[in-house]
Structures are given as C-alpha cells and as structure tokens.
Image (cartoon, helix red, strand yellow):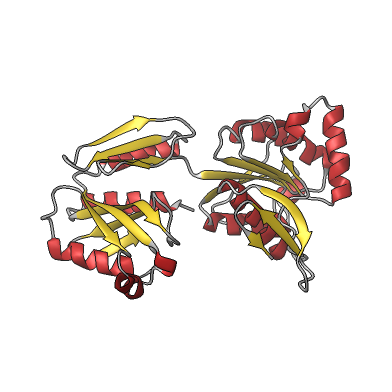
Amino acid sequence: MQSADQEVLETAAGWLDAGHVVYLVTVARTWGSSPRPPGSLLAVRADDARFVGSVSGGCVEDDLSARLAAHGASLTLPRIESYGVTPEQNHKFGLPCGGHLDLVVEQLASAEPLRAILRAMGARRLTARRICLATGEVSLHATERDAVLRFDGENLIKVFGPAWRLVLIGAGQLSRFVAQMAQALDYEVIVCDPREEVAASWQVADAALDTRSPDDAVHALARDTRSAVIALTHEPKLDDLALMEALVSPAFYVGALGSRANNAKRRARLASLALPPEAIARLHGPVGLPIGSRTPAEIAVAILAELTAVRNGIVLRAVSHAPNAGFPTVVSDEIYTI
C-alpha cells in the first residue's frame, strides 16, 4: 500500500507526463484544531479540477481545486493561500474550532524531480525538498533522520522520507488484523515467520512475508527511526530473537504481546542474555493501550493506538481508572483517552 505522499507524487508525475497543468499544494502552517498536519499534500490537475491527496479532509479541497482550475496555467510563481482566517470561512469550509491553514501553492514544471524523490523513498533515503516562494526555484537535498518541515514565509522545506515500516513477528490471526489496519496508517508491513506451516497461510495483500530467522529479519529491516517491530507469536524462542535485535536497533517502537507476568519473564530472559538495561527499558509490553481489548481486532486497535501515540510524540506516563467507566484511562502529556 502506498503512503499518502507517494500517492500524491506518483499521480502528479503521471499527470505531468500526460501534458496536464498540475499544482502541488502543501500545508505549511496550522493554528487551532487543524484537520491535517503541516506537510500534508494535495495535487490538483488544473484542466478539470481533479485532485489527489488532502489538506483539510473537507471543503477546502473542492474550493481550492476549482479556483486553481479557473487560473489554469497562469500562476507561475508559488503563493500562499490561507483558509479559516474568519469565522465565516470556518463555517463555509468546515474547519473545526477556529482552525487556520496556510497553504503553499506551486505550479509543477516537471515530473523528474518528483520521480527523484520517489526513487529515494523506495531506497529508504530521506530527501528535503526546498522551494523558494520568491523565485519558484526548487532543490532537493539529502537530510538527517530528525529533519522536519520548516517554513519561514519565504522558503518551504518539506522532508520526504521512506514509508513507515512495521515488522511483525508471527503470521497469525492477530498479525493479519494489525497488518491490515497498519497499511491504512501508511505503514509498509513486513511479516516475519520462519515456521512453514504458519507462513503458508499468510494472505494479506501488500504485506510481505519474510521467512528468515526473526533476528536476521529484524537486523535487515529495522534500520532507521521510521521502523517499528512488534513480536506477536507467543513463542519465546522466536519473539526473543527478534527483540534482542530490535531493542538495540534505531526502531522508534518495539513491542511484545503477552500478559504483564509473561513480559516480566521476557525481560528477565533478555537480561540474562546480556541485553543492556536501557535497551530492555525500551520494550512496550504488554503491547498496546489498555482499552479492554478482547478480540483480535480490538487488540489490533489497541496496538496501533499506542504505536500512533509514540509515533506522534505522545509520552504515555501512567494508567489510572476513570470513575463510572470501568475501562482504564491512559494519561499522557496531551490526551486523556477512555
């Protein structure tokens, strides 16, 4: 499954190759409760107002694409379009809670720079794309793993990275639900299971199957901070092999299925294998947020909720109990989720 950025870039490149006038729209800044984060992309085909991607998830796309179609090829220099500046705009375009968007709109000149970014993404390399609003000059640069979008009103630098990668250990039923949901969240999913009788039944479209030993697979696949590893087999000899590699890798998230008691035993085993305490402390186990999950689908929701929180920089600090609810409440620096 393609990431959102990939879909926009590939579609825009195809439109350019076919001779269409194409505009690229990037969310540069947001205020209030914006529906889409900075860096979100929209490509608009000026010939017929057709578009791909999203900058608001609502009526902004329809209005903006119609306006760009009316301009045709006349907008030769980048410009800033703002939405949600007035209460009337908020009401008209459906921006919640006073949300405000600054969008950088540019007419694309060629498909090749887009394809260069796509090639780098395919090779799991980060690329910073800089556009100067005064001149329309575009340049591509290699960048670091911690690079983020920057906009100073004159230059917009958006980082295009490799797809977020999720390595699942075990090809069972739970992995199927996790894989399907994770693909909708822009993860490239790879399932590792060397057991022939289990691997033979793996049938999730676009989720690759890797039959190497879990330690070898994780060593090869969890190479950067856009990677996550989750052990789901309930087989210590498989899960522990994966975790030994994952916990010393750059992966931003490492989790393991199992009860608190089983995870305590797992941590003891990892310590006995000379894994450093600071590496063991990275383990999310039991994996997932405590939302009272019972079925495989519910457990998958809990796992991906925690994965999303960590990916978005939410620090989950404690678990308490909400009055009159009966379900645990996860308390973080920014959210209270029941």
Tag count in the figure? 0
Q: Kindly tell me whether residue 53 is visible in this rendering.
A: no
- Residue 135: image x %, image y %? 16, 39
Q: Where the C terminus falls, by quadrant?
A: bottom right
Residue at the (75%, 66%) spot, across then down? 322
- Residue 204: image x %, image y %? 60, 56
Residue at the (39%, 68%) spot, across then down? 95
Q: Kindly tell me whether residue 117 is visible in this rendering.
A: yes
Horizontal side of 149 relative to 75 (left or right) equals right
Horizontal side of 79 relative to 121 (left or right) equals left
Residue at the (68%, 36%) spot, across then down? 212
- Residue 132: image x %, image y %? 23, 39
Give the vertical position of 248 relative to 256 (above or below).
Answer: above
Q: Nearer the viewer, residue 86 or 266?
A: 86
Name the image quarter holding residue 123: top left
Horizontal side of 68 relative to 150 (left or right) equals left
Give the vertical position of 17 relative to 337 (above or below).
Answer: above
Residue at the (57%, 47%) spot, across then down? 311
Give the vertical position of 144 relative to 196 (above or below).
Answer: above
Name the image quarter holding residue 202: bottom right
- Residue 106: image x %, image y %? 22, 50
Query: Which residue is at the far top?
Result: 274
Query: Which residue is at the far left?
Result: 74
